[in-house]
Image (cartoon, rainbow, N blue to C red):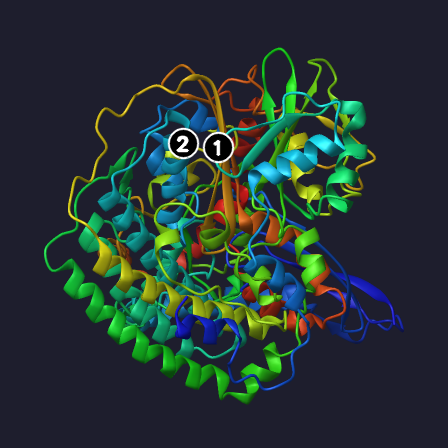
Amino acid sequence: MDLDETGDATVAMLNSEDFLDWFDDITRRFLKNTKIDKAVNYVTTDFFNWAQRNSIYPLHFGIACCALESPMATFGPRFDMERFGVLPRSSPRQCDMLIVNGPVSYKLAKKLVTLYEQMPEPKWVMAMGECSISGGPFWESYNIIEGVDKIMKVDIYIAGCPPRPEAFFDGLFKFQEMIRDNKQGMFNLDAEVEK
Amino acid sequence: MSERTEAIEQGQRDHHKPELFETDTLKHNLQTGMTGEQEVLQMLKGKFPDIEDMKITLPRRIEFKVPAEKLIETCNILKNDMDYKGVSFISGVDRRTGFDVTYMLFSLSHSPVLVFTVSLPKDEPSIHTVCGVWRAANWYEREIYDMFGINFENHPDLRRIMLRDDADFFPLRKTYKLNDKPKKWQEECRRVQ
Amino acid sequence: MAEMWVNMGPQHPMTHGLWTLKVKIDGETITDAIPEVGYLHRGIEKIMENRTFPQSIPLADRLCYGSAHSWSSLYVFTVEDLMGVVAPERAQYIRVITLEIQRIINHLLWLAAYAADLGILTMFLYPMRERELFMDLMQMISGGRLMYDYTRIGGVRNDTPDRFEEETLKQIAVLEQKLQEYEGMMDDNDMILMRTMDVGILRPDDAIDLGVTGPNLRASGVPYDLRRHDPYLVYDKLDFAICVEKRGDCYSRYRVRMNEMRESMSIIKQALKDMPAGPIMAQNVPKKAPKGSEVFTRTADPRGDSSIHMIGNGTDKPYRVDIKSPAFINISASPTILIGNRIADVPSIMGSIDVCIGETDR
C-alpha cells in the first residue's frame, strides 16, 4: 500500500505487482474451493492438448547439414510438414520448439542459450542428427561441444547423419505422443503454487 | 563451338534495361586463347632473374620461392606488370622447423596459376601483409593468423576470425594435439547448464 | 541523420546459416558493413590431418550441405593428383554427370531460398519440388539423399544402376519445362525486378580484386569458368557455354544461375551419350602419398572456384590439408557490394551471392 504524491492518506492504491498477486491468490482460492478447476480441466484438457501437439512451431534456425532436411526439405512440397501443423517461425518469441540441427561450437553456445531463453514456455528442444547428439564426426575437434545436451536439456533425439525427412517425422510423432502423455495443456494449480 | 552456345555467349537474352559494363576486352583475351605455361615461365624468368627454382610442376601450375623481404616488391610486379590480378588463396603450413605461407594467383589472360612460397622462422613468425596489393588477402591472412599465429604487419584488421576472441591457442600448429579441448570453455559450458 | 549499427544474425531469416552481418546505416543507406563468421568452425582441416585418405571422404562431403558431392570430388581429385592416380574414362564421365546433377540441385536450392528471401513463398515450393527429383537421381546412383560419399580415390564406388540414363533424361525434360515456368514467375514479376534490378552492383574490377569467383564473377561480365580455363575430368571434350551477364546486379546473378542449369542439363545429356564402357576403378591405387609431394587442385564448385592445397609426407595421412572455399571469400567481399544500398535490400543482395556457412567456416 502506497500513499499518493500529495501525501493524503485518504487515497490508498495497489501497485500492479501487488494487484496481480492479490488477484492470483483470490482466483486460485476461488477455483480450488469451488472445484471449478476440475470442471475446467475435464472440459478443456483434451482440447488444449490436441491444439498444442498439432501446432508445434519450431524456430527457423539452420546450423548445418540437417537444416536442409528438417526446416527446408520437410517444409517443401514432397514432405510438407505443415500437414502436421509444424510451421517454422523466424522469431524465437513465437516458437515452442528449438531444433538443434548441427554441431554446436563454443562460439555459438552462448547465442544458442540466449535463443532458448527467449522462447516462451512451454518449450522443447530437439537434437537432430549426430552432431547435436554427440558431436558426430567432429567430436574430437577443438571447437565443438560433444552434444547439445551439455548445455541444455534435450527432449527428443533423432539419429542419422543427416536424418532423412521420414526420420524427422517419426521423431515428431513420438514427440506428439510425449506431449499427450504428459497431459500438456492441463490447468494445474498445485504446480504453480510450488513454483 | 555450336551455334547454340555462341548465341548464349553473345548474351541474347531479354534484358529489360541496357547493360552496365562493357566487357569486350576481357572476353577477347579469353577467347583468343590464354598464354601457355612456357611463355609465362619465360616472362617470369625475365622479370625475376634472382629466383632460381622456378618450375612447372603440373599442367598450368608454376611454383617458386620468394624471400620474405622481397614479398611486396614481387607481388606488385606480378600484379601490375604480369596481369596476375586475383589471388586464389593464401595458405599457411607448419613445417615443424618453421612456417610457410603460400600464395596462389590467377590471371584472366594467362592460363597457369602461380604458386609461390615464403618461408618464415619458427619463433615469432611475422610477414608483411599483401592486403594493399589484393584486397582479397584480408580474410585469408586473418585466417592464417587465427590458425597458426603468424603475425601480418600493417594488416588493417588482424583479429581472430573462426575462433572466439578469448582463444589462447593456435589449433593448426603441429604442437597442438587433436581432442585437446580448451579447459576454460568446457567449464563455461558446464556452468550454463 | 545519426548513424547506427544494426546487427543481423546469427539467427536471422536473411543469413541462411550462422553468420552475423553488422551494418552501419545512415537513415536507410548502408555506409559500412562487417561480416562475422566462425560459428560453425568444426576444425575439419585438423581432423583430416589425423585421418587416412579414404576416411576423410565423408568429412569432405559434410563441408558443404548444398553441394556435398562437389566437395568430396575435389578432395578425391586432390588425393589423386598427390598420388599420381588417373581414374578410368568411364569413371570420369560418371563424375561429370553426378557433379552436374549436384550443380542443378544446388542452384535449385539457391533459387528456392532466394525467392523466399524476396517474399514469394510459392516460388520456394516449386524449385524444392524439382530438386527432389534430382535428389532421387543421386539417391539412385549413390544411396544418399543429401550426403553421397560416392567418389573413391581412383574412380567411383559403383557403376550407374539400370534405367539411370532413362530416368535422368526424363527428369531433365521435366526441369527444362519447369525452368520456363520459374522464369515466368520471376522475370514477369515487377516486384522481383524492382528488388533485384540495379541492386547490389559489383563491378568486374572490384570482383577480381576481391577474389570473387564463380557465378558472381560471371554475373559481373567476366567470362571465367574453371571448367573451360583450367579443365579437369573430361570437360574439355564437352560443349558448353560460359554463362555471362553484364549488369553485375542481383538480377544478373539470378540469370547466370538459371542459364547454368540449362548448360548443366546439356552437359549431362552429352556425357550420357558419349560415356564409354569400361572399368570404374583404377588398378593398384596406392595407400600412401609420396614423401614431399605437394599439390594445388582447383575445381568449379557451384558457388565459385574451390581449391585444396595438400601436402603428403610418405604416410597414409595428409601432412596438411588447406581448404579454400568460394563462399568464404564471397562473404568477405560483401561490404563492397552492400555499401550505398538500402538496408531493406540486404536480404536481396546477400541471398543473391549464395552463401554456404558449412564450407565458409569449415
Residue A10 x/y as whole percent:
80, 75
- Does residue B160 show up? no
Tell me the crowding category of disc 1: few under 14, some 14 to 19, or many 20 or more residues within 10 angstroms, Cα based.
Answer: some
Quadrant position of residue C346: bottom right
Q: Quadrant of the N terminus of chain B?
A: bottom left
For badge 1, the amino acid type reads Leu
Depth check: give the residue in front, A106 or A33: A106
Depth check: give the residue in front, C17 or B139: B139
Task: Check disc 1 and report the residue beneath it.
Answer: B58
Viewed as shown, does residue B181 lie left or right of B92?
Answer: left
Tell me the crowding category of disc 2: few under 14, some 14 to 19, or many 20 or more residues within 10 angstroms, Cα based.
Answer: some
Quadrant position of residue C139: bottom left
Viewed as shown, does residue C219 lie left or right of C295?
Answer: right
Q: Secondary structure at mark 1?
A: loop
For badge 2, the amino acid type reads Asp
- Does residue B155 show up? yes
Residue A54 x/y as whole percent:
30, 69
Q: Disc 2 is attached to a residue of which chain?
A: C
Task: Check disc 2 and report the residue beneath it.
Answer: C81
